[in-house]
Amino acid sequence: MRYILGIETSCDETSVAVLEGRATHASIVASQADLHAQWGGVVPEAAARQHVERLHPILQQALDTAGIELRQIDAIAVTNRPGLIGALVVGLAAAKSLAFALRVPFVGVNHLEGHLYSAFLTEPDSDIPFPHLALIVSGGHTELVLARGHGDYQLLGHTLDDAAGEAFDKTARLLQLGYPGGPEIDRRARQGDPNAFRFPRAQVAGWRFSFSGLKTAVRREVERLQAQGALNAQAVDDLCASFQQAVVDALIEKAVSAARAYGAPTLTVVGGVAANSALQAQMRTACQRAGLNLKIPPPNYCTDNAAMIALAGYFRLLAGERAAYDLDAYANAPLGDDSRPQ
């Protein structure tokens, strides 16, 4: 088994990657952000149609970048859970067709497992030993996972309502900052005062998170400022900074506490929100104080990409896993659940 093809179509990025073992030779991502910006969020049917249109040219671009031909592919890994059903089906159908035509094995990969492996894309195994703690923060997920080995995960806690990335996008929409909202809030926050507004940090038992109350608090503050005619550019910057700080505080407090509690010397922060500059800077400081080794993928591997799916698939293939052609797609599936929809 030499070349592995990865396919990722769980949401609004069409991505194909080619790995040789653990080495990434191509990782092509076509974002649909401009398309969905007109609606202020991802429209599932539109996303699925875009995947249908883009997957073949993205596949060819990945092969060309890797400098190989399709017939040289030895195995295929594809995201089949969780995500938008219509979007997942496009990638899964492509993977099955290619596997059948090439007579090669394929495996389905949990999208969250892919994010866990994004931290390994630029690091040797020795730098991210097991067990380690992973904080997955993205548009659809905020979870703390104890990774005990390849394919061996324990979910410690998750969000009870909005994911961190979802809260970013909804707050950006409230402030009319466009879509996707995370990068713009990050940019505006650098010019704002994180202490300008006293937003709540939800006190939730265990390793769980909650961001709906924070989102509501921001809305009420925006309405108050609008009524006073005081919602100017500086106020927006301060709102962004104060909101962002509340999210960052919650993520850091829970992640560092969980790492200490479970004796995990290494903490990985993965997913789209892991690219946030304030989270990265403050998490580094917190981990240094706690004596933890911190690993965060580069920005191109924080967001959805097929390289992380291919790498997760690589370890599943090494373990002897093979999927059958009746493999299905699931909108919701916890990490570590290989079969049952939830």
Image (tube, rainbow, N blue to C red):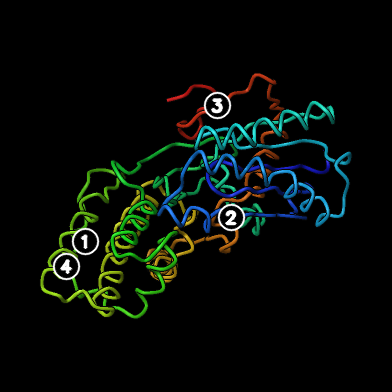
Instruction: Give the mark nearer the N terminus: 2 vs 1.
Output: 2
Residue 218: image tag: 1
How far is mark 4 from mark 2, CA to CA? Answer: 35 Å
Instruction: Give the mark nearer the N terminus: 4 vs 3.
Output: 4
How far is mark 2 from mark 3, CA to CA? Answer: 27 Å
Q: Quadrant of residue 200?
A: bottom left
Q: Which residue sits at x=35%, y=58%?
A: 168
- The x, y position of residue 175, in whole percent, is 29, 65
Instruction: Give the mark nearer the N terminus: 4 vs 2.
Output: 2
- 1 or 3: mark nearer the eye: 1
Left/right placement of residue 10 relative to residue 248 reads right
What residue is disc 4 on?
Answer: 198
Left/right placement of residue 286 relative to residue 297 reads left
Local crowd size for mark 3, using a 10 Å CA cut-off: few (<14), some (14–19), many (≥20): few
- 4 or 3: mark nearer the eye: 4
Query: Quadrant of the image for the C terminus?
Result: top left
Local crowd size for mark 2, using a 10 Å CA cut-off: few (<14), some (14–19), many (≥20): some
How far is mark 4 from mark 3, CA to CA? Answer: 42 Å
Do the numbered discs 1 and 4 sit on residues whose CB atoms are within 8 Å?
Answer: no
Residue 31: image tag: 2
> In the image, is residue 124 above or below residue 3?
below
